[in-house]
Amino acid sequence: MTGNANGGGKGATLPANPKFTLLVIVLCQSLAMTGVTTIFVVSALAGQILATEKALATLPIAFMFVGNMAMTIPASLFMKRFGRRAGFTVGAFFGIASGLLGAWGLMAGSFTIFAVAGLVQGFYNAFWQYYRFAAAEAVEPTYVSRAISYVLLGGILAAVIGPELAKASAELLDGARFAGSYLVASGLAVAAVFCIRFIDIPPPGEEESFGVGRPLSVISAQPVFLIAVLAAMVGYGSMTFMMTATPLAMQGHAHSFDDIAFVIQWHALGMFLPSLFSGHLIRLFGAVRIILVGVVVNFAMIAVVSSGTGVLEYWTGLVLLGIGWNFMFVGGSTLLTEVYSVSEKGKVQGVNDFIVFGTNAAGSLSSGLIYYWYGWGAVAYAVVLPLLAVFAMALWLRVKRRAARRAAVS
């Protein structure tokens, strides 16, 4: 089935000015991702300060993904009923609350409050993750992959500014290291509230709001659905798993906070700079091939980070990790748009993100535990089998499609 439902195809209404709407969505994504990048740089280190059991330092990040997982389906269904703009606004208020809670937890020395802040940040993340689908709905079907990749370009601003904001605000409040970083993240969410007002996506029609479509069991039985979800799940999960442990590993190998911020900054650039061309590559070569390339890049990452613990190895490996994530996540998200209709998109997108960010929750928590128990090398090798599974399934789909095309020609 060719859905076309996620773009300007059957049953969809395009904005009056698609280019302006896409630009606004990119800006909103930039604000959201700058906030979460700022938090990612400091969260594990702040957790290490507050946690009695140091192996639980990444628990607030795990809570972030738990919150993301828990809210993905409600957020999708809310937007299915009330529209994208209303949903993004609700999400931004969660972002404001999260930053304030995080700062409060650090000032009060409470690991519990700090962990709850991670959970609420996850609620915000669940909403803004749908910017990529909102962008796809703002364009004609033939431009869906590029629209999704352009939205991820918002991460370039996050990659450049987020770590710098983290460094500048880390000591902003005396006696509460990193609390200022959470206040900055809250301020970025305030800015997002105003930016969202300019998103011009027509409200959902009757078919989208009240249509039922096929049962989820039928949709999820499609091989394309399974591979799309697996690619996004493993690509995102591997990235989160490795990135969460990186600040702890670098600190354990006597690298400075500036070096840690530098590596995370370049990792984020590796994640989002490929969006300048990944959508175009998908249009030329297909989503499945780009997913396969993403897996190969991730294997190169494993080889690099296993070769040493200097800044160069961390920097190179984390850049490759970002590129692999981009190809697998954009490829998976694009592939997903092939499997559903307008009336089905709310539940399909929700289930997809529930699975993806459920995996992230497990990965972010287990990352810290595996690092403390077994070391950095074990963290890198832990992602090998999931990546092999994606490669095998994507290769199978590519061979199957090629055989179908040859049969059609003959």
Image (cartoon, helix red, strand yellow):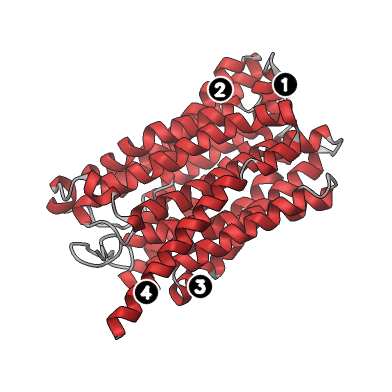
Counting from the top left corner in percent of width and height, residue 8 is at 27, 66
Specify which label sits upstream in the sequence, 1 or 4. Answer: 1
What's the amino acid at mark 3? Leu
Q: CA–CA distance between discs 4 and 3?
A: 22 Å
First in sequence: mark 3 or mark 1? 1
Q: Which is more toward the observer, 158 or 408?
A: 408
The residue that disc 3 covers is 281
Task: Determine contact: label 1, label 4, CB under 8 Å.
Answer: no
Of residue 378 and residue 118, the one placed in the foreground of this image is 378
Q: Which is more foreground, mark 4 or mark 3?
A: 4
Mark positioned earlier in the residue sequence (2 or 1)? 1
Per the image, label 2 sits on a secondary structure element best described as: helix
Q: Specify the quadrant of the image occupied by residue 327.
A: bottom right
Q: Is residue 211 visible?
A: yes
The answer to whether residue 146 is visible is no
Residue on which disc 1 sits: 49
Q: In the rendered view, does 174 fall on the left or right side of 111?
A: right
Identify the residue position indicated by label 4 in the image.
403
The residue lying at 39 percent from left, 31 percent from top is 70
- The relative height of residue 70 versus residue 227 in the rendered view (above or below) is above
- Res 358 label: none
Residue that label 2 marks: 115
Q: Are marks 4 and 3 in contact (CB under 8 Å)?
A: no
State how far apart marks 1 and 4 are (Cα).
Answer: 56 Å
Q: Image quarter for residue 146? A: bottom left
Residue type, numbered disc 2: Ala
The 10 Å Cα crowd at callout 2, few under 14, some 14 to 19, many 20 or more, is many
Q: From mark 2 to mark 1, how far is it between C-alphas? A: 13 Å
